[in-house]
Image: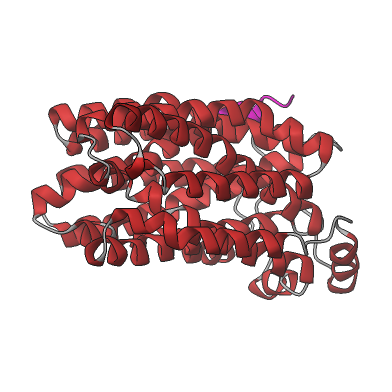
């Protein structure tokens, strides 16, 4: 396997710590600044919207800048934003800085995933993407629970000092270790929009949107869910650790599953499992007190596995559907993923403030079910329409 993929996974590990930690930090941030759970969710809402819109626009502005500089620059920008968050005295400032941080994080992840997909030999795209996902999964296993413990013990700002230091070192490693000569993304905005004409891509994107809208609220507001079922915030590191174990298990298996049975079937299995997990959340308040924590740990672990499995399957399939524009296809899926997360954060915050956290899985079940119905419409035959479209448009696959 190409060694460059492992350097990408290392930097993805750092960025995933920040993205995964925020759910556990929201109650602490809200308490310090005197805002409600729904208002604290603005940190996720602004981040997700910027993650969706910023990286594609930045990619057009950067034009043909080499991937090494883009990857290292994005990671260094993440370090600067993390440091700014650590010293920010105003809640509104936190929202603004984390929104900027999202553009850096999204630019890195999209470029890293696209680079891994294009480096992969035929038939091994799932395995190469799995390495990047494994770096993110290891962050969920080790970095996120440790960050939750540090935040609970020393304050949430300590987390961002640590993230700033690690991201700075990761940026240096990327700049010095990645080889020169990896071309950047030179596609225009017109080329990117043209990819949307493939009906298979449209169905896949809408499926991703609905699944994220339905499944993400219980992740973003996991602290509120724990409070609703009578569990102390001190147990949050255990819950996050369980999710990390599931994520690592996914990171070692999902890519091979995609390569073996296909991305469409893997996505259907992952989405159906997400639906089952949401249904199980509704049972938590009915359990005896002694079983609530073990049940939540099990659900968190399963959700960490199946949610990432679905994401890897969809990302791989998007690359198949648009083989002449792999970076665009993956970027579109990431943007849709983030828009779904933004809607989940905004609507989820309103739901919690009005009716309570246990309504989150209740509204999520029909959305995920609709997502599965759409996913069934995604063509199994991968890339035919996109190749014809690319031939007409002259879009270069690199």
Nearer-the-camera pick, 192 or 301: 301
Q: Quadrant of residue 80?
A: top left
- The stretch of residues the image draws in magenta is 1-7
**Taking the image as drawn, is residue 25 in sight?**
yes
Q: Quadrant of residue 362?
A: bottom left
| Image quadrant in which the N terminus is located | top right
The x, y position of residue 24, in whole percent, is: 28, 40
Coloration of the structure image: secondary structure
In this view, 41 is above or below 70? below
Q: Which residue does the image show at 37% across and 41% down from the upper left?
A: 284
The x, y position of residue 196, in whole percent, is: 71, 71
Q: Which residue does the image show at 25% across and 34% down from the upper left?
A: 159
Q: Is residue 181 magenta?
A: no
Nearer-the-camera pick, 355 or 262: 355
Q: Is residue 360 left or right of residue 62?
A: left
Q: Is residue 6 magenta?
A: yes
Nearer-the-camera pick, 80 or 17: 17
**Taking the image as drawn, is residue 51 in sight?**
no
């Amino acid at each position: 396997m190409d060694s460059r993929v492992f350097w990408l996974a290392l930097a993805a590990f750092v960025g995933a710590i920040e993205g995964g930690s925020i759910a556990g930090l929201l109650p602490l941030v809200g308490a310090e600044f005197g805002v409600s759970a729904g208002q604290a969710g603005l940190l996720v809402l602004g981040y997700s919207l910027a993650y969706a819109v910023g990286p594609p626009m930045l990619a057009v502005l950067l034009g043909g800048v080499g991937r090494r500089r883009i990857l290292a620059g994005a990671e260094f920008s993440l370090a600067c934003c993390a440091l700014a968050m650590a010293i920010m005295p105003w809640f509104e400032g936190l929202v603004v800085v984390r929104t900027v941080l999202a553009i850096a994080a999204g630019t890195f992840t999209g470029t890293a995933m696209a680079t891994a997909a294009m480096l992969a030999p035929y038939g091994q795209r799932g395995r190469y993407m799995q390495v990047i996902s494994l770096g993110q999964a290891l962050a969920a296993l080790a970095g996120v629970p440790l960050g939750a413990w540090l935040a609970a013990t020393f304050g949430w700002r300590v987390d961002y000092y640590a993230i700033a230091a690690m991201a700075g070192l990761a940026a240096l490693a990327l700049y010095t270790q990645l080889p020169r000569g990896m071309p950047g993304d030179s596609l225009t905005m017109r080329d990117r929009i043209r990819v949307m004409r493939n009906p298979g891509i449209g169905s896949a994107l809408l499926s991703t949107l609905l699944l994220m809208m339905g499944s993400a609220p219980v992740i973003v507001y996991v602290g509120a869910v724990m409070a609703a079922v009578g569990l102390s915030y001190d147990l949050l590191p255990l819950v996050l650790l369980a999710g990390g174990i599931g994520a690592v298990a996914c990171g070692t298996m999902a890519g091979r599953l995609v390569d073996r049975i296909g991305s469409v079937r893997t996505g259907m299995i992952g989405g159906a499992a997400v639906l089952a997990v949401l249904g199980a959340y509704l049972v938590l308040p009915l359990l005896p007190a002694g079983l609530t924590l073990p049940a939540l740990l099990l659900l968190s672990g399963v959700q960490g596995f199946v949610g990432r499995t679905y994401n890897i399957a969809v990302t791989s399939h998007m690359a198949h559907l648009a083989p002449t524009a792999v970076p665009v296809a993956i970027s579109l899926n990431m943007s849709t993923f983030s828009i779904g997360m933004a809607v989940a954060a905004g609507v989820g915050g309103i739901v919690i403030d009005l009716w309570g956290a246990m309504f989150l899985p209740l509204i999520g079940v029909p959305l995920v079910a609709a997502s599965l119905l759409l996913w069934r419409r995604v063509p199994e035959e991968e890339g035919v329409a996109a190749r014809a479209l690319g031939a007409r448009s002259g879009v270069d696959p690199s």
